[in-house]
Amino acid sequence: MSKKIYFPLILFLVAIICYSYAHPQYTISDPTNDLVNPYTLEKAPVYKRYVDIVKVTVEKKGSLLVFKIYLNGPIPEKPENYLSYVLTLDADGDPENNCKSYRTPGDTMYAVFFNAYEKKWKFTKSVWKYGWVNVGTEASYSINYKGKVVEVRVPLSELEVKDKVCFKVFTEHDVTYFSGEMLIKTTIGDLASLTCYTFPKEYTVTLDIPEKSWIEINGVKYKRGVIKLTEGTYSVTVPETVNIKKEVRLRFIKWSDGYTGAIRTIKIDKDTVLKPIYVEQYYLKILSEYGNPIGEGWYTKGSLAKVSITPQVTLNKNTRVVFSGWTGDVDSKSPTLTIKMDSPKTLKANWIKQHKVSFTYTDIGKRIVVKPEYVVLKKETGEELKITEPFVWLDEGKYTIVKVSWEGSDVTPEEYKFEVSEPGKYEVPCSIYKVKIDLKNYFNQPIKDAVVTIRFTNGTEKKIKISGVQEIYLPKGEHKIVVEYMGMKYEKEI
C-alpha cells in the first residue's frame, strides 16, 4: 500500500506598499520561487508558477474593494488536484474575535478554489465563529488564466470597517510528489499577522457645469452632478465650446477661481466645487453670391457684429451686379451694418444684375438723330428712372419709355417697350416730324435771309434764318410759324 506524505508549504515575504493618487492603489510585491514548508520554513521541493504570488493589489472602486492576486505563471483551467486562492479579512476591525491561526488570521474568508471531485471552480465566503462557517455573499470573482490574475471583488457593505481593512492572501495546491500527494502553499504578507490597507480619503466634488457639457477627470468623462474623489491630484479638462442647439453654443472663458485654461491640474484635499465659466454665443450667417461679405461668425451674447459687403461687382465690361439690400433677420439697404447679437441671425444679400444699354433717338422717319434733354423710363414694378445720357446701366427687366423731352417738348413715342436681359442697343423713333418751309415772293422767287420764328406749344420759341426752301424737324403738337421779311410779317399755324 502506498504511503501519502503531506508537506504544507508557506511563502514568507516583506511587503512593499505603493500609492497612486491618480488611481489610489495599494500594492504588495513579493520575490518569486520562494515556496516554503509552513512548519519547517524549508524551501518546497516542488515549484508551481501559478501557486507563486508575485504581487497583490488593493483598490477601492466605487462600492467595491477589489483584490487582484498576480501569479508567476498561467493558471490551469482544469488543475489535476485541489487549488485555492484565499483572502482572509478582519472585517469588523476587532482583532479579539479573529481566528488565531497564523494560517488563516481574520474573521472573514473569501476562497476561490478548484474542487477536484466536482472538476469545477467554486467561490465561497466563510466567517469565524470559533470555526469557519459558510455564509451567503454578494462578493464575486474572476480568473484570467493566461493573464495570471485572480480577482476578488468584495462589497464595502460586507465590511464594518470604515478607515482601513487588514487582510492576508494565500494559495494552496495539492501536487503529486514521489509516492504520494503533498500540499504546497504560499502566503503574502507577514507570517503571523495581517497586512492593512488604509482607505483613501474621499471628498465630495460638485461638478457645476452646463447641462449639455461634460468634464473629464483623469480620462473619465462626467456629466453635471456630484461625485466622490479620493485625496490626490487630478488632470481636469472641459470642452472649449459646447453646442446647445443649431447656431447657439457656449464658449469657455475661465474657471470660477480665475484660471483661464480649459485643461488644468487640481488637488483634491477637501470638498470642492469645479465650475467652468461659459458665455453664450450666437452665429451670424451671411448668404451672398457676390461682394465678399465680412462679418460672418460667432458672437458673444449682447456684442455688436459689424457687417460689410462690396456694393457693386463687375462681371464683365457690360454686365455687373449691384447690391440692393439685406433681408432675413435684418432689412436694410445699407451695405454696412452694426447688429446687436441677441439671438442667432441670418442675413441674405440681394443683388440686381445690370447691363449696359445704349439709346439712339431719331425722328419718326428715322432720318436724323436727336439728343433729348432727358428720357423717363418706367420699370414693370412702376418705378421710374430719368436718364440724360445715351449710355446707361439698367436692371434686368421690362421697361416702357414714358417721356422723351427734346427742345422743351414732349416727343415721346406712342408706345415703346423693351426688355433688358443682356447688354444691348436700342433705336427710339420719337414723335418728331419733318416740315418743309418754302419761302417765295410774289413773283414766285425764293426769298433770302427771312427770319422765321417757331413758337412751340409749350410757349417757347426758336428763331432761324431761311433762304428759299429749308427742311426743319418739329415735335408733335400745334405750333405757330412767323415769317418776317423786309418789314412784312406772315403767320401760319401747323
Image (cartoon, rainbow, N blue to C red):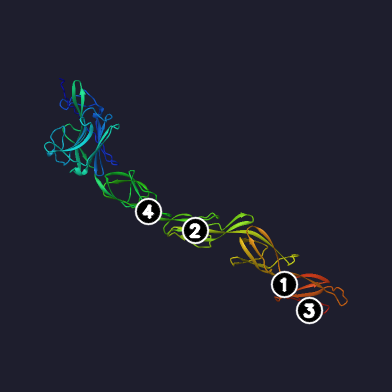
Q: Which residue is mark 1?
A: 476
| Mark 3 vs mark 4, CA separation in Å | 93 Å
Residue 213: which disc?
none
Q: Look at the numbered disc 2 and give the secondary structure of its residue.
A: strand
Q: Amino acid at mark 1?
A: Lys
First along the sequence among labels 4 and 1: 4
Q: Which residue is mark 3?
A: 491
- x and y, in percent, of residue 166 in the image: 19, 38
Q: Which residue is mark 2?
A: 347
- Mark 1: few, some, or many residues within 10 Å (few <14, many ≥20)? some
State the residue lying farthest toward the front. 118
| Mark 2 vs mark 4, CA separation in Å | 26 Å
> Does the rendering let one see residue 441?
yes
- x and y, in percent, of residue 79 in the image: 24, 29
- Mark 3: few, some, or many residues within 10 Å (few <14, many ≥20)? few
Q: Quadrant of the N terminus?
A: top left
Q: Look at the numbered disc 4 and give the secondary structure of its residue.
A: strand
First along the sequence among labels 2 and 3: 2
Q: Amino acid at mark 3?
A: Glu
Residue 209 is left or right of residue 59, and the answer is right
Residue 278: which disc?
4
First along the sequence among labels 2 and 1: 2
